[in-house]
Amino acid sequence: MKKRVAFYTLGCKLNFAETATIARSFENEGFDKVDFEEPADIYVINTCSVTENADKQFRQIVRKALKHNENAFIAAVGCYAQLKPEDLIAVDGVDLVLGAKEKFNITQYIDDLTKLNKGQIHSCDINEADFYVGSYSIGDRTRAFLKIQDGCDYKCTYCTIPMARGISRSDTIENILQNAKKISENNIKEIVLTGVNIGDYGKGEFGNKKHEHTFLELIQALDTVEGIERLRISSIEPNLLKDETIAFVAQSRSFVPHFHIPLQSGSNDILKKMKRRYLRELYEDRVAKIRELMPDACIGVDVIVGFPGETDEHFLETYHFLNQLDISYLHVFTYSERANTEAVEMEGVVPSEVRAKRSRMLRGLSAKKRHHFYEQQLGSTHQVLFESDNKDGFMHGFTENYVKVKTPFAPELVNTLQKVVLKKIDPDGIVTIDLVND
């Protein structure tokens, strides 16, 4: 009998790409990959340090795994495993915790799958994470996450990612193109580029600060890959989103008009305390440039509420700035304290109930922005890539500019690009369509 392995991923698209790569290493060793809800011999949990209540979430997932098989071998990898290995190994049932350097060699750390009386930690100093492992996910037939870069050299005062993932380093253009071709050979129509700080793409593998290539050169090369209908940029810092990149996306063959750009605060005072590398004026300029060249582009924004020292005035500055900005939706994060960051020592702690209230206000603004963006698109013709899930008789998909649509489920539409006209916004906030038959 082949041994069975199951995976659970917390956090970002980058984690999903890396989980898929780790899964392939198990399959190469003769394991059968099964769904996490099934009994397995080993469960691998890819953790996240950004997720709130990461510790509590991890415990719940371990308990869930042990319900499926009380004798299962439990391994933890990922950002939280690098930052807090002792916390994870202390959880009942956990046998192995691997840090940033060790996670891609997980099969070498498993001699057999016997439960251990005392779990083992194999974790490096993060300064030893001076290597690069390319990754991509092809679990979802319609879309793949392709890792192009890892680590971060920025020193934002609230962030633990540099401690969890190390310095900024990149894959070679040749490897990325090779992985993109492998993805296209699996009949996947869309690739999402992912990394920690992808606009910093091009830094050498071992901390060489010189850029061998630029992000622009990479996307120009990817635009030529046959078989990939769509390429999407996941998240890019405003100071690294250059005019030339915006101009290239506007006229490219396969890059879609969708940008996700972290802002974090609309107050310059707070941006300086966060040690962000731009002020709100530059952010405003980036949005204006996108709108000038791609009026129908979707623009998503990350914002953090409740950062230490954020007064009511600072928050309202952020709220009004976002309200007047021509953006499409927000991802709202409530600030939470992280050990070993500068922010945790700062004065002016914002009470949790105030953080929650500000978060609700911005989520309300996000719903309003998304609805307004969708309204502007009604009556227009777009290409939709349909997904495979059947939810209450409907299937869903996204236009190139990230409008979520639905239509009655039809198996022949799964993983196809279809021309549609956007009709109306349903009460659930999703747009109904008419298929266009050429």
Image (cartoon, helix red, strand yellow):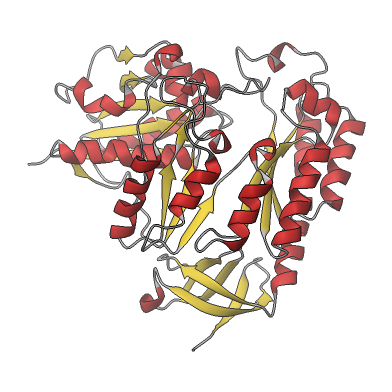
Residue 166 coordinates in the image, percent (x, y): 48, 20
Asked if residue 199 can be seen in this view, the reply is yes
Residue 189 coordinates in the image, percent (x, y): 40, 63
Looking at the image, the residue that sits furthest to the right is: 313
Q: Is residue 317 left or right of residue 94?
A: right
In the rendered view of the protein, which quadrant contains the N terminus? top left
Asked if residue 310 can be seen in this view, the reply is no
**In the foreground, 375 or 33:** 375
| Residue 417 figure quarter | bottom left
**In the foreground, 293 or 433:** 293
Q: Is residue 257 left or right of residue 147?
A: right
Q: Is residue 247 left or right of residue 1?
A: right
**In the foreground, 275 or 22:** 275
Residue 243 coordinates in the image, percent (x, y): 68, 47
Q: Give me the residue at 55% from left, 47% from top.
A: 234
Eyeballing the image, is 375 above or below 91? below
Number of marks present in the image shown: 0
Q: Give me the residue at 46% from left, 56% from top.
A: 223
Eyeballing the image, is 433 above or below 208? below
Residue 274 coordinates in the image, percent (x, y): 73, 24
Q: Is residue 146 left or right of residue 326?
A: left
Looking at the image, the residue that sits furthest to the left is: 1
Looking at the image, the residue that sits furthest to the bottom is: 438
Eyeballing the image, is 2 above or below 42? below
Q: Give me the residue at 88% from left, 45% from top.
A: 320
